[in-house]
Amino acid sequence: MNIDDMFSEIILTIDTREKKEDRIKHISNFFEYRGAYVEKKALARCDYWIDGIYKDKDISLGIEYKTIEDFAGSFKDLSWKLTESYEFYKDVALFVETGKYDLIDVENGTLIRNYKLKDMEGTLRYDIFQNLLRSFERDGIYTQTFLNTFEFPRSVLNLMNYIIKPMHKGIQYKNECYEDIYRNMLMQFPGIGAAKANKIIEDFSSFHELSTYAENHLQDSIGKVNGTRLYNFCHLGLWKNDN
C-alpha cells in the first residue's frame, strides 16, 4: 500500500471545540497526505475521532487531547468522561502534551511545571500525574504523553497499529463500571445522595443523556431545587439555586 492511500478508508473527525489551529493543521495534513477524509463537526465526547477501515480492520478511536495545564485543571472530570466515551467509540485514548517542563522539588513531592508559566501556575505533582495515567489505563483508556504537538500524529499512528493487532480484544467494558463512576460523580453534588443518584441513573442512563434534557424533566426526576441545580451545572457549568 502506498503512503498516499494507507488511510483511504479512514475519516478523521475533529471536534468543533478544538481551537488549536497549529495542532489541527498538523494532524489534518498527516491524515490527508495518506488519503484520509478530514472533517470538522461537533463530537459528543473526545476531541478527535478516527473511524473506518485501516489495514482491513474496523477502527473507531476517540482521542481526548490535553496539555499538562489542561490536565491539571480537569482530571477529576476525565475519569467519567473518558469512560462514558465508550458509548460512542470502540477504543478511547488520552493524549497529554507535557511540553518542556521543570521538575521542582518541594516538601510534598515533585511538581511538574510548564516552563512558559509563571510562579506555581499549571503545576501538578509528578507522582500524582503518573498514578492518574495508570488509573486511566486500568479503566481501559490508552494513555500517551509527548513533548509537543508535532509528535501527535505519529503517536496516533502507533496506537492505530496496536489496536488492529489480533491480540487486541478491545475494552471489556461493563455498564456497571460506568454506572459506579456516574453515581459517584452525581453524589458529589449537594443535595444528591445515593437514593437520588440511583433515581437519576434509572431515568437518565448516562451523563450525556442527562445533559440533553430540559430543566422540567430533571425537576420531575429529583425535585424542583435539585433539578434546577443539575440543569444549571449541565448547561452552564454552574452549581447554583435560582430559586
Image (spheres, rainbow, N blue to C red):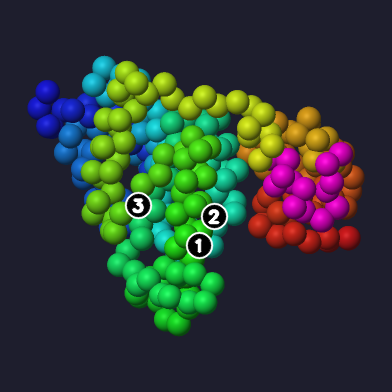
In three-dimensional space, the C-alpha distance between marks 2 and 1, rounded to whole angstroms, equals 6 Å
Q: Quadrant of the C terminus?
A: bottom right
Q: Where 41 sits versus 163, above or below?
A: below
Instruction: Name the amino acid type tagged 1.
Output: Ala
Q: Residue at x 21, y 38 (%)?
A: 32
In the picture, measured across the screen, residue 35 lies left or right of residue 200, that is: left
Q: What residue did someone put label 3 on?
A: 145
Q: CA distance from mark 1 to mark 3?
A: 14 Å
State the image quarter where residue 169 is shown: top left
Callout 2 amino acid: Phe
Report helix, strand or loop for mark 2.
helix
Image coords of residue 237 (percent x, y): 66, 57
Checking the image for residue 75, the label placed there is: 2
The image's mark for residue 241 is none
Residue extent of the magenta highlight: 182-195
Crowding at dot 3, Cα within 10 Å, few <14 / some 14-19 / many 20+, comes out as some
Q: Is residue 6 left or right of residue 28?
A: left
Across and down, in percent, residue 222 comes to 86, 42
Mark 1, residue position:
72
Tell me, yes or no, whether the two marked residues, 2 and 1, touch with CB atoms within 8 Å: yes
Q: Residue at x 45, y 82 (%)?
A: 119
| 181 to the left or right of 142 | right
Comes first in the chain, label 2 or label 3: 2
Image position of 106 (left or right of 102): right
Q: Classify residue 116 by image quadrant.
A: bottom left
Query: Can residue 73 be seen in this snapshot?
Result: yes
Q: Is residue 15 visible?
A: no
